[in-house]
Amino acid sequence: MNREILVVGAGPTGLSLAITLRRYGVPVRLVERKPEPAGVSKALAVWSASMEVLEGMGVMDALLAEGARLHSLRIGSGPRELAAMAIGDGIDSPYPFPLLLSQARTERILAAKLAELGVEIERGVELTQLSQDQEGVTAELKHPNGRVEIQRTPYLAGCDGARSTVRQALGIEFQGYTEPQTYLLGDVLIDGGGLDHNSIYLWWHNGGTVALFPFEEATWRVFAVRKPGAGDEATTIAELQEHIDRHGPAGLRLHDASWLSAFRINERLAERYRAGRCFLVGDAAHIHSPAGGQGMNTGIQDAVNLGWKLAYAANGIGNADLLLDSYEAERRPIARSVVKAAARKLHLAFGGGRLDTILRDVAVTVFGNMSAVQKMLQVELSETEIVYREGPLVALGSPPRKPRRTGVGARARDAALADPPRRLWSLLSEPHHSLLLFEDSRHPIPVDGIMEGTGDRLTGR
Ligand SMILES: Cc1cc2nc3c(=O)[nH]c(=O)nc-3n(C[C@H](O)[C@H](O)[C@H](O)COP(=O)(O)OP(=O)(O)OC[C@H]3O[C@@H](n4cnc5c(N)ncnc54)[C@H](O)[C@@H]3O)c2cc1C
């Protein structure tokens, strides 16, 4: 059988998965329904944990060159600033800040890296159907000229977004609900108001909220919500200006919109992530409000988690079923809490009657200026605290000798290694696992014994 793993969808998730598979030497085919790369900004924030895995993919220099670092979140009500939160405090990462750039640019950088690894995106090719048996998956692919191709593949990854054809073909439910309001979005230029282009502004007044996110050289994303029952029709720059004048910081004039959208928000999670040899990854598996900016980030991290396991399975290393089942066991609980937290943040920022608004003002003024609260929020959003202690792979490890001191399954802290000099985390981002042995001269470690029987899976340094 053809050994190529079929990845469906060349958004940030599919691109990250294809890169990860290639880094492990696995052949990949990546098909994308759209004939051209996406031009709209969508996800603006790349968080620390994503940047750590993107460093492993070799794209961080390009992302840093094109993105801007976010410095602060300013929350205000009418003429008053209630809280100013410094961003980047307390995140234990080589990238302790969110990086702002448009998703279109992020995708372009990922696609260029994938091309370097020898994979071109097959554009205009749509997966229309699939079936599977014990040995593999049969996919029906429709080409731009109408030709229908049947491809056999050992594994198929559905990175095909919220309306996933793969999820529907597998009959997996997308459980959740649609938020009742219509949200408005505009990527615009803004004159006046003296806004700092490295800060996010979240402002409420007169019973409504607006949020402003800076990105690229001078563009702002304006985000607002229509009154319930006010319809779903397209928005205009005049409607956004009205929201800013009524609820936002004073003195802003919006102009030159590059993207305007009115949309409903879904909060949903796939009932399963795996069906036999097929997997759901990224928005195909979870979708939620953009509050907190976690969607693309969670998808990239899903892709890396599944990627190395699929690569091991494809290369015949380890127990394929155990590894592949651990993808859902590790990643679905993370998505469940991301979906819940994003809905909570959306309702806190954009919901509420008069009493709720007064209470929110007091809460934000008191808690929003406390550094402990600021740190907690940032660490949550950075996704650096994600660990898989409850997962089936960690459960395979021997019980720790001192359970309270030994964090089995915990995130490794970075450290400077002496000989040769390098950062510990630089080792961890390479496409293999690392076993670190800390020798004490009084109790030498029998390294040869440990290496015995591992073949070329373990090499000493
Ligand atoms: C306004 C807005 C703001 C956002 N802000 C943020 C943010 O700040 N941070 C963040 O992390 N996330 C954010 N998100 C979410 C983020 O955009 C998504 O989570 C992200 O795009 C998901 O990536 P994906 O690759 O999983 O899916 P997608 O980006 O949807 O990509 C799926 C791809 O699959 C292709 N496809 C679909 N069906 C088929 C088929 N049958 N055959 C072949 N190809 C197919 C599609 O054409 C598409 O290119 C935001 C989203 C929106 C709408």
Image (cartoon, rainbow, N blue to C red):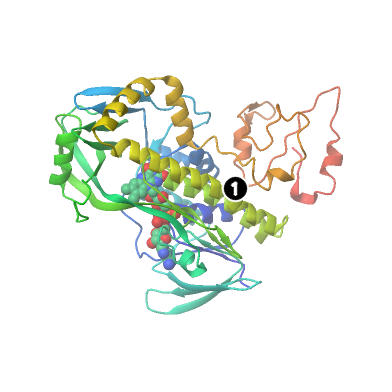
What residue is shown at x 48% (from left), y 69% (from top)?
169
Q: How many marks?
A: 1
Does the image show residue 105?
no
| Residue projecting furthest to the bottom | 147
179 with respect to 16 (left or right)? left
| Residue projecting furthest to the front | 355
Q: Is residue 243 above or below residue 307?
A: above
398 with respect to 197 (left or right)? right
Question: Percent from the top left, x then y, of residue 381?
Answer: 45, 36
| Quadrant in the rendering for residue 373 | top left
Does the image show residue 263?
yes
Q: Is residue 43 above or below residue 416?
A: below
What residue is shown at x 81% (from left), y 24% (from top)?
440
Query: CB of residue at label 1: within 8 Å of ligand 1?
Result: no
Looking at the picture, tell me which residue is in the foreground, 423 or 141.
Answer: 141
Looking at the picture, tell me which residue is in the foreground, 442 or 172.
Answer: 172
Q: Is residue 9 above or below residue 365?
A: below
Residue type, label 1: Glu
393 with respect to 75 (left or right)? right
| Quadrant in the rendering for residue 212 | top left
Q: Can you say which quadrant of the picture contains the N terminus?
A: bottom right
Question: Percent from the top left, x then y, of residue 345?
Answer: 37, 38
What is the crowding at mark 1: few (fewer than 14 residues within 10 Å), some, or many (at least 20)?
many
Q: Quadrant of ligand 1?
A: bottom left
Q: Secondary structure at mark 1?
A: helix
Question: Percent from the top left, x then y, of residue 217?
Answer: 28, 37
Q: Name the residue beneath numbered marker 1.
A: 330
Question: Percent from the top left, x then y, of residue 404?
Answer: 70, 27
What residue is shown at x 30% (from left), y 53% (from top)?
264
Q: Can you say which quadrant of the picture contains the C terminus?
A: top right
